[in-house]
Image (cartoon, grey):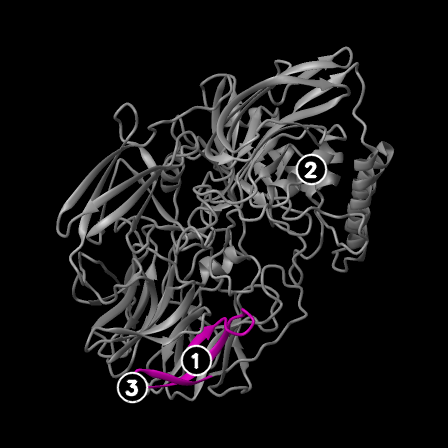
Amino acid sequence: MLLGAALPGLAQRQAVLRQIDLPHPYYFREMYLPQLTSGPSSLAWSPDSRELVYSMAGSLWRQEIRSGIARQLSESVSYDYQPDWSADGRWIVYSSYRHDALELWLLDTTSGQSQPLLQNGAVNLEPRFSPDGRRLLFVSSLLNGHFHIFVGDFSAGKLTNVQRLTGEHKSDLPRYYYSAVDHEISPVWSRDGREILFISNRNHIYGTGGFWRMPAEPGAQASEIHYEETNWRARPDLSPDGSRLVYGSYVGRSWHNLWVLPAHGGDAFAITFGDWDQVNPRWSPDGQRIAFITNRDGNTALAIVAIPGGAIQRLTVTERRYLHEPGHLHILLSDAQGQPAAARLSVIDSAGLFHAPQDAWIHADDGFDRKERAFEAHYFHALGEATLDVPAGGVQLEVMRGFEGPLQRRAIQVSAGQTAEVHVTADEGAWGVPAPGHWISADVHVHMNYGGVYRNTPTHLLLQAQAENLNVVESLIVNKEQRFPDIAFNGLQLDPASRADTLIVHGQEYHTSYWGHLGLLRLSGGIILPGYVGYPNTAASSLFPSNADVADIAHGRGALVGYVHPFDDPPHPFDSGEKLTDELPVDVALGKVDYMEIVGFSDHRATADVWYRLLNLGWRIPAAGGTDAMANFASLRGPVGMNRVYAQLPDRHLSQDSFVEALRHGHTFATNGPLLGFTLGGMQPGEAVHLQRAQHAHFVARLRSIVPLEHLDLVCNGRVVRSLLHSPAARGDYTGEVTLGQSGWCLLRAWSEGARYPILDKYPYATTSPVYVQVDGSLLRSPGDAAYFVAWIDRVTEATTAYPDWNNATEKAHVLAQLAAARAIYSKMR
């Protein structure tokens, strides 16, 4: 198998805020870290309960609760979040994202000037003044990249004597999504300033933890007063009299609402209700209201609930008053026929800061090359037009619409108080798929909602798909801990929001981290529950049903079953010390797998390495592409359609069935940017070349790419038989002859070693599904690959045999029998 090694000096993507050492960053990054949004996010009350200060569009703003006017407080080369207002009204402390860190800054409300308060190069979050204003709590990653609570003395605008309150404790619990090291987050002072309350996952396997209370002194003993899972969103706040705690929780539901709990523990009750998030609560100093953030209408907004009473007031922003008068940018988007078009847009000012319309959903990349830009890339989607405020001066506009045309850049000068208008033809310079036939693009792995900042709907998901020039979105219902955020769409399949050229289809991701995750497309009869197995300390701790059993249920309901985001690293089954539990080769042997995400939220080359071995044993497995896009996230590794599959349909009629059948038969190529065309002996991917004897076959390879690529390879039976590029290229047409001496398969693959903007993935990659080859009726044999999977199943069998938490012996015997049956099939191939 050929796996490319990275070359020195090439662009490399690295995670945003690399100081944080936690697994699965797509959880804590979105659900805990502050996000750049066009609407309000974190907030705090003024001491007189008449105003709010909050973060919006990367700046701090203040607004009287009886007014619609928002006044800008901060303006710098940073993104500012999480303000807290001192009791004397003099100071506002906040977390400022600059210089690749989140530092604490201080705003003097009398002078309007900001100054650094704490600069340690770490991620410093959630600052809270003590009631007397003499101390400051905050969360920091300073110790080993883990979240712990710190405190410092505050006086005259200075922070001194900073100490860590909570200790570093490594748990031996079997945590999968969370670090082995306990974290402590979201601290709040008791009203007498002697104690703190906070959230910690100490003693818990899942989630962000329970509610703890401790004296506000380093090393003091803490005790848990309440536990329920809140998915990083609790952010508790105490009532002014110190008797009650308000916080965000989804307990028993799929969306976060506000709950109230006795300050020393007890039973909670809800004070807000709705199938949307209501989070980040802050109790007014007069005790009469709780302000919070809601995404009821999709984007973030301010709301206030009366206590007692329950009436909710939306605090709208009717006017934004800037520190300096901005200019205005009006962007008109059309297609080649002059009709309104959708596209992905990015607007950056001369300081490198991003700007968006006041109602746009801002999305941020989760990694970037520091040599390329000061901050990660941000973007928004628009249809027809977009109007936004920008600082006076030069701005750069980027417009992108899928992979069938170039990234367009425009440099624009904007004057204060004036509107600059720019018209962009979104598909200018577009090219098509460089292969004959009618091709459509699909993302087979999208989650419409998954605990993100925004509240997504099929209508908005349709906009996201259109802006990315995507024809099919497979929106997979999935759990996040106990929640199924899109359960309301269970059993719907084709959504009414779909259009003739853009389909939104509801399916399921079966979310079992032990056996591997499955995509279930065109699943009728509703999702398969409980949706996961192998969750210790739950009623789903058993490893039954296996993925093979789930595949049988799904196939019985008409579904296509695929393995999604398979491998971040190549498995090493011959290493007896490597624990393997992935069921993929078992299910392939048992005939359960209809496709694989070769391009997805995994390493494409590592996944292809395993795929090639399976193909070498005669299994016909089509290539698919799925982003695993959390489409309501503000921060994600790429938009809907970043990893996609192109499928060749028999005609121009797009339907759920026509796409699924094209995928089933392998008339596809998967990509995160490059477009491929490939025929071998006149046959396209998914088809077979039948030869009476070994002979030469003519191939045609075509490439069209939004970025230059270093490799375009013809791969046969797992080996590169022809390298078609001798220097980086973005397009080309190539023909030649290749000797087909034995049965097997060939495919076309394109890739580069390092990151290439605007592809928001680790590296560009595309692959066709195979063209299959049969010479003289012989079977393809690969004893080495068969031995590889025998060893793989042996590792899985060892782990599964030792697994302690089965419901009964019958389940265990059933699953072990499936493993043995698959092993026997591979053993005969050795």
Precedes in sequence: disc 3 or disc 2: 2
Q: Secondary structure at mark 3?
A: loop
Q: Which residues are magenta?
A: 138-162
Q: Is 140 covered by the magenta stretch? A: yes
For label 1, the SS is loop
Quarter where residue 311 is shown: bottom left
Q: CA distance from mark 1 to mark 2?
A: 60 Å
Q: Which residue is mark 3?
A: 156
Location of mark 1 (residue): 263
Disc 2 target residue? 2
Secondary structure beneath disc 2?
A: loop
> As displayed, is residue 174 above or below residue 695?
below
Query: How many other residues sit within 10 Å of disc 1, few (<14), some (14-19) or many (≥20)?
Result: many
Q: CA distance from mark 3 to mark 2?
A: 63 Å
Residue at x 49% of width, y 22% of height? 434
Position of residue 659 in the picture relative to residue 584 (left or right): left
